[in-house]
Image (tube, grey):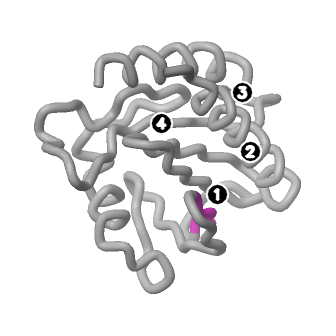
Amino acid sequence: MATDWAWARRAWEKWAPKHVGPEGKQVQAALLLNYDPSGPSRLLPVIAEQEGTRLTAVDMQPFLDFVKRGNLQTEFFSIRTNQYLVTSIHENWFCARCVNGTKSGGEGAIVMQMGAYLLVSMYDGSLASASQAMVATDQFAVQFNRRTH
């Protein structure tokens, strides 16, 4: 587990400064969450890393409960005051749009599972922004999955 954490941290430190931040970056905020539904979650902090936001484990618990229930197509999920509706589901990731956001161009999130982690990438905008955020999120997954055993 320590090896996985060290690798995840290195991948995060390479990825986040290039892709996460305010104006001009593909992703406005990102979180790397410890997520292993079969493991003893109380042994690990919920939020392994975050950039562009200041969320707590309490803020993320409703989201993690949503993921554990697995009803992606029939429920909304919340991150703080924003409610999201899942718009597409794939093998190890899904996309969602914020339904009560305040930004005129809209807001969205991409959630990707990689081993015992969930990467949550949040972006502002519509189709072009979603595509750019997906590319950035996928780049983290590529870096993360390069680890050698």
Q: Report the residue at 26% width, 54% height from top.
A: 37
Nearer the observer: mark 1 or 4; the answer is 4
The spot of residue 64 in percent (x, y) is 31, 56
Residue under pointer 2: 133
Query: Given the current orientation, which residue lies at the most extreme front position?
Result: 149
User: Does label 3 or label 1 sit earlier along the sequence?
Assistant: 3
Q: Amino acid at mark 4?
A: Leu
Residues in magenta, as a range:
93-98
The spot of residue 63 in percent (x, y) is 35, 58
Q: Amino acid at mark 1?
A: Gly
Q: Amino acid at mark 3?
A: His
Residue 66 lies left or right of residue 85; in this view the side is left
**What is the total number of numbered labels drawn onto the structure image?**
4
User: Does label 4 or label 3 sit earlier along the sequence?
Assistant: 3
Q: Name the element at disc 3.
A: helix
- Position of the N terminus by quadrant: top left
The spot of residue 3 in percent (x, y) is 37, 17
- The quarter holding residue 125 reads bottom right
Label 3 vs label 1: CA separation? 16 Å
